[in-house]
Structure formats: structure tokens, C-alpha cells
């Protein structure tokens, strides 16, 4: 985002969409306001955080969630806000609530790159889910076992995801773009006992190896699905084809769990080399579905398309946001950067299209989405990166000016803490609402309330993580956090935020050393770690910059041995190759600069803001801090 002052920013970004009174009356938010007896969103938000039990009970009833044993109360805070107990005494398996829509209604509209449009009904998805769960039991897997999914988000991947949870096991989500070394790290951290994958990935007309990456990562037992009709690889001894793994039985009993039982292990980069290992519980999907219902205004029969993967939180989010709201998810297996994806959006009659800003920028630069019929779209939603206002205005024009819901949160939140809503004017590139059920405070460096500064979450909320599997949860999120003047305990999140006039906000980057590249959260330490092996480099720092006020770009600052600078283009090429091989091919280096030494604080922490300023000065731009949104 840009760095204009409050008034200049709002003057330069006037509303691009205004809701009508008739439209507002049809929204899910209007229904909730009537239930709460309030007449403004501000009052509704206050009700949702001050009357948490009433709010979440209303959400659960609205979503028609199924319980094997009902809860005796929504929330118990006897152990404090750091350790809330949600849905006391309840017994539940959230998968049972994913099939409340009519069996003959459409659960998934899907298409493989180069293939035909297909549909899977709710009944068909439930049967395949049951077959997966029955197959896991038949193969001897037991409740609590961790099984990874490393494959594109297909209809089969959704059934595998739900089948694992139905069987009482835990999904380990790993993005299929990761290289073997990073896959191996995540398999190890999650104590994975088996993996579902494809033989190859078909993307952009190319077949890229996937099963081979699992073998190189020394994965445990692997179940392999074909990307097309037949497997294109020979399997290792002890591995299974999808056909041989899958039982014919589609009548499988659901394993009933406690609300705090894990359903999904996801990974989020912190400020160290190893990612944080974050378990989602049986209650986290309630947060996903609530956000979609009230903030993106998802209603039964809607079609949600969001190019993503089960290795990122938006993959599971899409499953629960769709199915728990009795809506349809649209899945395109292939590259979302070209016109074929746009034709899929059109043919699926998409009503909500999710994006990351770098994808929108690509569409705009190539013109590949021009002259398509996207008039079925009711709303866009954007997350993962900082949005550029001009790009979002262009995106809105593809669907006749429909609004963009900016959405910011994190894996450890299960959704967003700040968002857009459809009952307020849409100003591209800004947020216009705090998310329901969650509150936050913005504090300056002295810990005082401020309009701009570091953002802290006010716990508790359904969706907020309560444990980490490889780090001390309290140390990461609560240790040494300030308290508000009223004595509220605050939870660290790491974003910096600025409050604008009239109920709008913009992001001001991270307070820690993480960044978003191509919509993927990654720590500077992870990038620096893989580049340390390059000869003749003394020190390296990875920073995020935003030269055009849009999505973040990666710049590497290098200190060379004895001050001798290598050829810049050659070294940049070597670095890019190492990142592609060792970390993720989606991370592209925007620039490389040589420095004599890395600026450091007295405590020896690298001063990344100073490095960003130096890079900006090299472009004759103001040396201000670059805005960068972390999701």
C-alpha cells in the first residue's frame, strides 16, 4: 500500500462501490444485527466481543452445526483468557456438519487443466469421504495419527481431507510447491505416518514431478493418485495406488471427538528457521464459516472459487467456508494465471472469487481476463499480500464493479481479525471493519494506544490457536506483551496497522522478520538459511520491499568475503536457483544489493528497516518504511 497521510489517502481512494439500502437488507449481517438488536456495525462488533457466548451460540445455531452431545456452555474462562475452553462437554466431528445441504446439490465444481467441467454432488462427496475413512481404518490407522496431503486441491483431495478427519485422524497440510527438503522438515515436525499425493502436477501444460519429491523427502507410506487416467510412475515397495488403497465400503462410522481435538496441522513461518506447527481443532472451522457467512456474505447456493492449496490456511478455509454454509466450492487444477482459469470462473458461475494481489497484477498486465462474462460474481476477496488500489479497481471492473473484501488474519487465527464487509462502502486497498468475535488494540512503541503501531489481539475467540507442537505457545504469543490501561491481556500477532478516518484501516507491514511472497508467508531466516551455503558470502539479509505500492518483492542484501563483490547477475542467478531447489520456486528475487556490513542494533538484530531505506534511496524514492501486509 502507499504511504499517504490519512486525509490524502482517502481523498485519492474514494469509494468504488456503494451498497444500496435494499441490498443491505438481504445480507447475513443485516440478519445478525436484527438478532442482536443493534443498528450499526460498530455496535454489532462490540456485542460480538462483549457477549462472546451469545455471539458464538448464535453463529452455531445459524450454521446448523451438528453435535453428538450438545455443549453445556459456550465458553469457560476459569483458566484465564490464554487457555479458554470452548463448547464445554460437547462431542463433535465437524465433518458431520459439512453434509447438511441436500444430497443432490452441488458440493464441488471442478476442472483439470485442459479437461472438461465436472461436478460432484454433496451425496457423492460424502460417499467418497466415507470410503476414505473406512480405508484408513482397514489399513490400521488410528485416531490421532497424522496423515499428510501433498497434492493439488482436487475433488479427491477434499474427500481425503474430510475422510481423515472423519476417521479421527489429523491432516498435515503441505503445499505441493515446496521442495523435498522443506517437505521432509514438515513431515518430521508433524510426526507424519502416511502421505497422500499425486504422481505429477500438471500446470501450464507441463508435468512436474510430485511423487518423486516425496521419495526424495524420505516420506513414510505414500498413497498415490494419478493426475490423469493412469499412474505415470512406478511405486516404491510399501506404497499404494489410490485404486488399491480405497475400500468399496461407503458406510463408515464417524469418530466423535472433543472440541479441542486436532483436525489439521498447518505451518506458519515465524522469525526462526523451523516453521511454527499450528494445530487446528474441531472448533476452528466454525471461525472459517462464520467469517465467510458474515464478512464475505456467503449464502446457500453460492459458488466460491479461491486458487489455493491444502498446505495454506485458505485451502481448509475454503472447504469449511463452502460446505458449512451449504455453498459450492469451485476447484481448478492448474495454473490460475491464464485465460483457461478465467473461463472456468465464468463456466462455474462463480459468485465469490478469492485472489492474491500478485495474481491480479499478472492478469492485468497480460490482459488474459478481458472480455469474459464474470457477471455472476457478487464479491471478490483478497488476502495474502498488500493490495494495490488501481489493480483492485481494475479487478472490480471485470464483474461490473463488484466490491473487494480485503481480508487479513493468519493460520493461528483460523481466519481474519480485520476485513471488509459488504454493508459499507468499498475503498480499494483498505479494510473497513474489525472481524466479528475478535477485537484488537493498536499500540505505539511505548505501549500506549495509538492510531498507528503494532497490533495486538484481545483474546479469546474461537479460531485462535491454543498450542504449538514445536514451540512454547505462551512464549510466542503472550510473554512480555503489554496490558491495556483497563488491564486486558493482549496476544501478540506481529502486524502493524494504521487507523484511518471513517472506520477504515491500512496495513503497515510486520513488526517481526516475516514477509509475504506470492501470497505465502515466509520468514527472512528461512530464506537466509538456504542462501548461506553459497561460497564467498559473509552475511545475508532478506528483506521485503514494495516498489510500486503493491505486493511485496524480495530483495537480498549481501556482504561479500573480503569486500570483493561478485558479478551481480551471476550471483543473483545462483541465489534464485538455490531458492528454487531448496525452498520454493514461487519465491522470486526482485533485486540484489551489496553492502559492506549489515546494520545492527546493540542487541545484534539486523535493522531491516534501514536496509529497506537504503534500497529505496538507490531508486531515488523516499526512505520510508515499505508497507507489507501479512496474512
Image: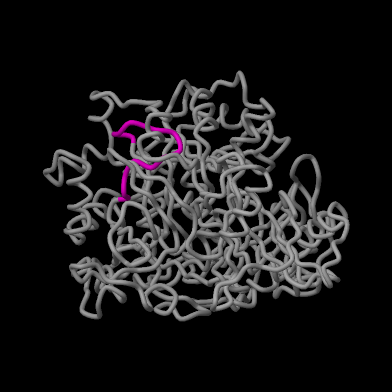
Front-most of residues 329 and 284: 284
Q: Position of residue 185 (x, y in %)?
A: 66, 73
Q: Confirm whether the magenta stretch covers residue 91.
A: no
Q: Residue at x 78, y 69 (%)?
A: 215
Above or below for 86 versus 290: below
Residue 622 located left or right of residue 25: right
Above or below for 166 versus 114: below
Q: Residue at x 42, y 48 (%)?
A: 321
Is residue 273 at all visible to an observer of this figure? yes
Above or below for 361 versus 154: above
Residue 141 located left or right of residue 320: right
Front-most of residues 303 and 365: 365
Q: Confirm whether the magenta stretch covers residue 426.
A: yes
Q: Position of residue 402 (x, y in %)?
A: 43, 27
Q: Residue at x 19, y 52 (%)?
A: 46
Q: Quadrant of residue 182?
A: bottom right
Mainly helix, strand or loop, the magenta region? loop
Magenta region: which residues?
422-435
Is residue 101 at all visible to an observer of this figure? no
Q: Residue at x 42, y 70 (%)?
A: 255
Residue 461 located left or right of residue 400: left
Q: Quadrant of residue 149?
A: bottom right
Q: Position of residue 491 (x, y in %)?
A: 35, 68
Front-most of residues 406 and 299: 406
Q: Position of residue 502 (x, y in %)?
A: 27, 38
Q: How is the image coloured?
A: one colour
Please, which residue is most extreme toward the top here? 371
Amino acid at each position: 500500500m502507499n504511504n499517504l497521510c490519512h486525509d490524502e489517502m482517502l481523498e485519492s481512494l474514494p469509494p468504488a462501490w456503494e451498497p444500496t439500502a435494499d441490498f443491505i437488507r438481504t445480507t447475513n449481517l443485516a440478519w445478525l444485527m436484527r438478532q442482536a438488536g443493534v443498528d450499526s456495525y460498530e455496535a454489532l462488533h462490540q456485542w460480538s466481543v462483549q457477549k462472546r457466548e451469545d455471539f458464538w451460540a448464535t453463529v452455531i445455531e445459524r450454521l446448523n452445526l451438528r453435535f453428538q452431545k450438545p455443549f453445556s456452555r459456550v465458553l469457560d474462562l476459569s483458566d484465564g483468557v490464554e487457555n479458554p475452553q470452548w463448547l464445554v462437554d460437547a462431542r463433535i466431528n465437524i465433518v458431520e456438519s459439512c453434509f447438511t445441504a441436500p444430497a443432490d446439490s452441488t458440493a464441488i465444481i471442478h476442472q483439470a487443466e485442459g479437461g472438461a467441467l465436472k461436478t460432484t454432488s454433496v451425496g457423492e462427496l460424502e460417499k467418497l469421504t466415507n470410503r476414505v475413512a473406512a480405508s484408513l481404518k482397514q489399513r490400521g490407522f488410528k485416531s490421532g495419527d497424522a496423515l499428510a496431503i501433498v497434492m493439488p486441491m482436487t475433488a479427491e483431495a477434499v474427500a481425503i481431507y474430510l475422510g481423515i478427519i472423519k476417521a479421527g485422524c489429523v491432516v498435515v497440510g503441505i503445499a505441493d510447491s515446496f521442495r523435498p527438503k522443506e517437505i521432509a522438515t514438515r513431515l518430521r515436525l508433524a510426526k507424519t505416518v502416511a502421505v497422500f499425493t499425486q504422481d505429477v502436477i500438471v500446470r501450464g501444460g507441463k508435468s512436474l514431478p510430485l511423487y518423486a519429491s516425496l521419495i526424495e523427502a524420505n516420506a513414510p507410506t505414500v498413497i498415490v493418485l494419478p493426475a490423469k487416467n493412469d499412474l505415470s510412475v512406478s511405486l516404491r515397495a510399501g506404497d499404494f495406488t489410490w485404486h488399491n488403497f480405497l475400500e468399496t465400503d461407503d458406510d463408515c462410522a464417524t469418530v466423535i471427538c472433543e472440541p479441542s481435538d486436532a483436525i489439521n496441522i498447518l505451518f506458519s513461518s515465524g522469525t526462526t528457521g523451523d516453521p511454527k506447527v499450528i494445530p487446528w481443532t474441531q472448533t476452528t472451522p466454525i471461525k472459517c464459516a462464520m467469517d465467510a457467512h458474515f464478512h464475505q456474505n456467503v449464502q446457500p447456493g453460492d459458488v466460491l472459487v479461491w486458487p489455493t492449496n491444502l498446505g495454506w490456511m485458505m485451502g481448509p478455509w475454503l472447504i469449511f467456508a463452502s460446505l458449512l454454509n451449504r455453498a459450492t466450492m469451485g476447484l481448478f487444477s492448474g495454473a490460475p494465471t491464464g485465460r483457461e482459469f478465467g473461463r472456468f470462473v465464468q463456466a462455474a458461475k462463480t459468485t465469490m472469487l478469492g485472489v492474491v494481489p500478485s495474481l491480479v497484477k499478472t492478469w492485468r498486465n497480460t490482459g488474459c481476463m478481458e472480455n469474459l462474462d464474470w457477471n455472476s460474481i457478487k464479491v471478490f476477496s483478497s488476502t495474502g499480500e498488500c493490495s494495490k488500489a488501481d489493480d483492485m479497481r481494475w479487478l472490480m471492473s471485470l464483474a461490473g464493479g463488484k466490491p473487494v473484501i480485503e481480508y487479513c488474519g493468519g493460520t493461528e487465527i483460523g481466519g481474519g481479525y480485520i476485513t471488509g464487509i459488504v454493508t459499507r462502502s468499498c475503498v480499494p486497498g483498505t479494510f473497513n471493519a474489525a472481524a466479528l468475535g475478535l477485537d484488537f488494540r493498536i499500540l505505539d512503541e511505548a505501549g500506549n494506544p495509538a492510531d498507528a503501531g503494532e497490533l495486538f489481539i484481545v483474546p479469546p475467540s474461537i479460531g485462535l490457536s491454543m498450542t504449538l507442537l514445536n514451540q512454547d505457545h505462551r512464549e510466542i504469543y503472550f510473554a512480555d506483551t503489554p496490558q491495556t490501561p483497563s488491564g486486558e491481556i493482549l496476544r501478540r500477532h506481529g502486524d502493524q496497522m494504521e487507523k484511518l478516518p471513517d472506520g477504515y484501516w491500512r496495513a503497515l507491514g510486520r513488526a517481526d522478520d516475516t514477509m509475504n511472497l506470492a501470497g505465502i508467508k515466509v520468514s527472512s531466516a528461512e530464506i537466509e538459511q538456504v542462501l548461506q551455503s553459497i561460497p564467498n558470502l559473509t552475511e545475508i539479509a532478506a528483506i521485503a520491499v514494495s516498489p510500486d505500492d503493491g505486493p511485496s518483492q524480495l530483495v537480498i542484501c549481501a556482504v561479500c568475503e573480503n569486500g570483493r563483490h561478485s558479478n551481480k547477475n551471476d550471483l543473483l542467478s545462483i541465489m534464485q536457483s538455490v531458492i528454487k531447489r531448496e525452498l520454493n520456486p514461487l519465491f522470486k528475487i526482485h533485486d540484489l544489493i551489496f553492502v559492506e556490513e549489515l546494520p545492527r542494533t546493540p542487541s545484534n538484530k539486523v535493522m531491516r528497516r534501514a536496509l529497506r531505506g537504503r534500497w529505496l534511496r538507490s531508486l531515488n524514492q523516499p526512505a520510508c518504511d515499505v508497507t507489507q501486509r501479512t496474512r
